[in-house]
Amino acid sequence: MTRFDILAMGNAIVDVISSETPDFLSARNIPHGCMRLIDADEAETLYAAMGPGREISGGSAANSVVGAATLGARTAFVGRVAADQLGGVFTHDIRAAGVHFDTEPASAGRPTGRCLIVVTPDGERTMNTYLGACQELDHSNLDAALVAASGILYLEGYLWDPPGPRAAMQAAIKVAREAGNKVAFTLSDVFCVEGHRADFRDLLTSHVDIMFGNENEVKSLYQTNDLDAAMAELAGHACITVVTRSEKGAVVIGGGHRYEVGGEKVARVVDTTGAGDLFAGGFMAALVEGRSLPDCARVGCIAAAEVISHFGARPETDLRALVAHKLG
C-alpha cells in the first residue's frame, strides 16, 4: 500500500506578487508576460522597486501537489530551500497546506529561490525567477523509501537544467519504476523544451506514464505547428497525454481514445499564475480517485479556473466542494 498518492520533485520557490502598470515593465526592458531567469543582484534590485506584495510559497510542482492535497490526495514534496527567512516561509506554507515536506534546509550555499511576479491590469503575469538554492538539490536530498511509497512520482521540466537536480530526478525515476509506480512529467515551458528536447523525448519514450504540456510546448517538442501531429507523436509514448489549451480547456489521449474538454468560465481573470500547475494537480488527484479521463480533465479545469480568479498560485476556495458541486 502506498503512503502517498503523489510525490512531486521541483523548485522550492517563494512567489512575491505585486500589481504594477505596463510602464513598470517597459521602463526596465522586461518583456510583458515572459518567464525569465535573473541573478541575485537583479533579484534584489527588482524586489526593492516593486510595490507592496504578497509572499506565498510557490514553484510549479509544489503548486500542483498543494492543489491535489486540497482535493483530498495524500501528497509529498521534495525541493531544496536555504535556512533563511524565505526558506521558513516556504516550509510553513507547504506543510500548512497538508503536504508532507521534510527536505533538510541548506545551511550553506545560495539563498532560497524566489519568483518576483509582476501582475498587470490585464491579469497577465511576468515572472522574474531567481532559482537560488533550488539548483543545489542533489541525490543526497532523495529519500528512496519515500519515492517507493508514492503512487505517482511527478517531475517538473523546470528542474531538468542543473545537473544535480537532473541526476536526482533520474535516480527517483529508477526507484519509482522498480517499485511499480507511475511517473508523471510536465514540460513546464517552451524554453525548457528547446533546451532539452532530446532528453524530454527520451523520457517520454521510455520512462513517463503521464505527460502534461500546453499547446506551444508540445508543438515545440516535435518541432511542428500542427498540434494534432504533435499529439499523435505523444500518444505513441506516454500512456496518458494531457495538453492544456488555456480558455479552450484540454485534450486528453489515453487508452486509445481522445477526449476534448472545454474550459471553465471565469467571471474575471485576475492572475494567471499557476493555472497549469493547478490543472495538473487537479487531474492527478482525480485520477487517484479513479475518475474517468474526461472527468480528470474537468477537475483540472475547475482547479485552474479557481486559481486564476485571484492573486497567487495556491487555491483560496475549497476545491473539493467546488468539484462536488460541479461534478458530484
Image (tube, rainbow, N blue to C red):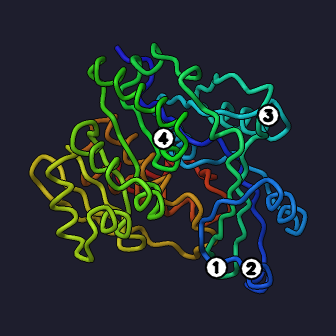
Q: Residue at x 43, y 31 (%)?
A: 6
Taking the image as shown, residue 46 lies to the left or right of residue 125, namely right
Report the Cα–Cα distance between label 2 and label 4: 33 Å
Residue drawn 27% across and 36% down? 207
Q: Position of residue 261 (x, y in %)?
A: 28, 64
Task: Point out the tag, 2 or 4, that comes first from the N-terminus.
Answer: 2
Tell whether label 3 touches label 2 (CB within 8 Å): no
As helix, strand or loop, the secondary structure at mark 1 comes to loop
The type of residue carrying mark 3 is Gly
**Circle 4 sits in a helix, a strand or a loop, which is it?**
helix
| Label 1 vs 4, first from the N-terminus | 1
Considering depth in this image, is 134 or 154 the residue closer to the camera? 134
Report the residue marked by disc 1: 32
Left or right of 41 in this view: 91:
left
Figure quadrant of the N terminus: top left
Q: Give the alpha-carbon distance from disc 2 to disc 1, as whole Å.
A: 7 Å
| Residue occupied by mark 3 | 88
Disc assigned to residue 25: 2
> Which amino acid lies under the numbered mark 4 shown in the image of this protein?
Ala
The residue at the point 56 percent across, 57 percent down is 274
